[in-house]
Amino acid sequence: MVGGLQPARAAERTPAVAAGSPIAGLAFPGITFEHQPAPVAESMLDRTAALGAGWVRFYAAFADMSPTRGSIEWSGLDRLVQAARSRGLKVLLALSTTPEWARPAGTDPDYGPVDKAGRATFRAFAVAVATRYQGRVAAYEIWNEPNLGGSWSPQPDPAAYLSLLSTTFAGIKSVDPAADVLSGGTGPSEPGEKAFEPLPWYRALYAGGLRSMIDGVAVHPWPHGEQVDVGEVPVSFEIRKVMDANGDAAKLIWGTETGVPTAGAYSISESAQAMVVVKLYDRWSAMPHHGPLFYYTLTDTPGSDREHHFGLLRADGSEKPAFGTLQGWLSSNR
């Protein structure tokens, strides 16, 4: 519980039989999905199921859900979890951010808990979430890209992250032993950013005892434009080797974000995107002991920046070639 409030369990709904591919999921951005009008969110989940994906990833953002100490707003997340399950989609929740009341003045929501009190507060939130969705959320990812200063501010710290991961893992497992708990997916750094690159980050985590704190490792295998064998995809294979060398050969490596934009900086054409998507899933399928790969994201949003154009659908809902190409690949590779 958080602030003394017991997290009442949300109403059950019988899920549809899972029909989607266990290797594929869709990742939805930030907190925006939770705030979509119900008909829009449900339409997006319908398209996800029609694609043939078996998973969805969205956020349980502590700062957004608990703007006031002692309360949690559950309605948006309840609606999404229930809607996903009713369509046979498994749910991965990314737990992240720190509310204003739980962090130092002048810091932002991506402030990473670095002291005992901050970790205890985040653990309490995670336990509340896992209690509420016990048996209905399949997996939890602890933070998003904690190796980057833009996601774990003011700067990434392997020891501090491990301390948070350790207590959060134990808390979630105490109320939902069957749920998978993953390390936070790692991303590549931007020039000038305070960051650890993903491979040295995971080497540092394993040296600090990561093996006892996770059920699986998450990475973000972004390609380099049209080149799948450049960028974070081959780095993911190296991280797989680090897992194996540290006694975690039996645990899965999950790709919780990947994708390529079709407008803005470093973008490619829509036809090239369709080819890259297939290459990504072919390459990921060759990974030993791999979990799902989550494509980011379903739908473009208005705007010229590349961040608005990773979708398999255009902003008006029409399909880019990549949607049908991935749909066909998933149908043929169950």
Image: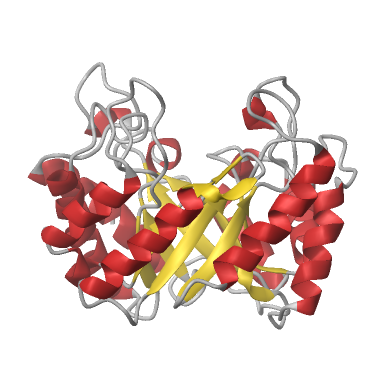
Q: Where is residue 85 in the image (x, y as percent from the top left)?
A: 64, 70
Above or below residue 254? Residue 65 is above
Q: Is residue 119 left or right of residue 268?
A: left
For the N terminus, the image quarter is bottom left
Residue reaching furthest to the top: 106
Q: How many labels does the image show?
A: 0
User: Which quadrant of the figure has residue 23?
Assistant: bottom right
Q: Position of residue 30 (x, y in %)?
A: 53, 39
Q: Which residue is drawn at 52% across and 47% down?
A: 230
Is 279 drawn above or below residue 88 in the view shown? above
The foreground one among 16 and 256 is 256
**Residue 4 visible:** no
Horizontal placement of 260 versus 47: left or right?
left
Locate residue 213: give its quadrant: bottom left
115 relative to 28 in the view: left or right: left
Q: Quadrant of the C terminus?
A: bottom right
Visible in this render: residue 228?
yes
Residue 187 locus on image (x, y percent): 42, 43
Residue 15 in the image: state x and y as whole percent: 67, 77
Question: In the displayed structure, would residue 292 be above or below residue 222?
Answer: below
Of residues 6 and 200, the one drawn nearer to the viewer in this rendering = 200
Residue at image coords 58%, 74%: 12
Q: Nearer the viewer, residue 37 or 293?
A: 293
Indicate whether 142 appears above or below 85: above
Q: In which quarter of the image is residue 260?
A: top right
